[in-house]
Image: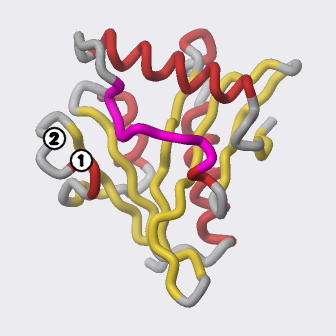
Amino acid sequence: MLLTLTPDDARAHRLMAEQQRELRQLYHDTDERTEPFDPASLAGGVLLGWEEDGELLAIGGLKPLEVDDTQLRSAEIKRMYTQPGARGRKLGRAMLDGLIIWAREHGLEQVVLETGDLQMAAIGLYESAGFERIPNFGYYVGVENSWCYGLDLEA
């Protein structure tokens, strides 16, 4: 079941840590692979999770980026992750769809994200949802193995 989580949900923090461990292994390094992230930065955005029998299996958040006249205009998808044992069940798609629906319902014009060049399943998911490559933004400018994507929600 898709649900809204609070940024201090311990289960979400555990999945975020698992995601970072998996990325460090994939990219053979010891550094966090993405922008340093504080779940409190989701204030004004949302953190969604997929829960079954009290266990959190997948997460994804929207971090506010651009606010115009107190209206949120764009957000970045952060920490999309599905536990390895729950993969292949389209939970990533459910999370992504939930974030896009939330963004549209809240009047956002664009959603952006960053993923790594070795994360082929994630790239396929984002491209199949209509995301298109955009120039690297913010923290990711100049990071060669970072691929950034955007989705225009007004189209």
Q: Which residue is labeled 1 in the image?
A: 140
Q: Is residue 40 left or right of residue 140?
A: right
Mark 2 closeness class: few <14, some 14–19, many ≥20 residues within 10 Å: few
Q: Residue at x 63, y 47 (%)?
A: 40
Question: Does residue 56 sit above or below 30 in this rendering?
Answer: below
What kind of element bears circle 2?
loop
Residue type at numbered disc 2: Val
Q: Is residue 2 left or right of residue 77?
A: right
Q: Position of residue 9 (x, y in %)?
A: 75, 32
- Tell me which secondary structure the magenta stretch mostly adopts: loop
Q: Magenta span covers which residues?
A: 32-40
Q: Which residue is labeled 2 in the image?
A: 143
Distance of label 2 from label 1 (alpha carbons):
5 Å
Q: Residue at x 29, y 13 (%)?
A: 30
Q: Nearer the viewer, residue 6 or 134?
A: 6
Q: Position of residue 47 (x, y in %)?
A: 67, 46
Q: Position of residue 138 (x, y in %)?
A: 28, 56
Question: Does residue 91 sit above or below 39 in this rendering?
Answer: above
Contact between labelled residues 1 and 2, with CB atoms less than 8 Å apart: yes
Q: Residue at x 60, y 82 (%)?
A: 71
Say whether residue 38 is magenta: yes
Quadrant of the drawing holding the C terminus: bottom left
Residue at the extreme bottom of the image, as rendered? 69
Residue type at numbered disc 1: Tyr
Q: Residue at x 24, y 13 (%)?
A: 29
Question: Does residue 22 sit above or below 44 in this rendering?
Answer: above
Q: Is residue 75 left or right of residue 35?
A: right
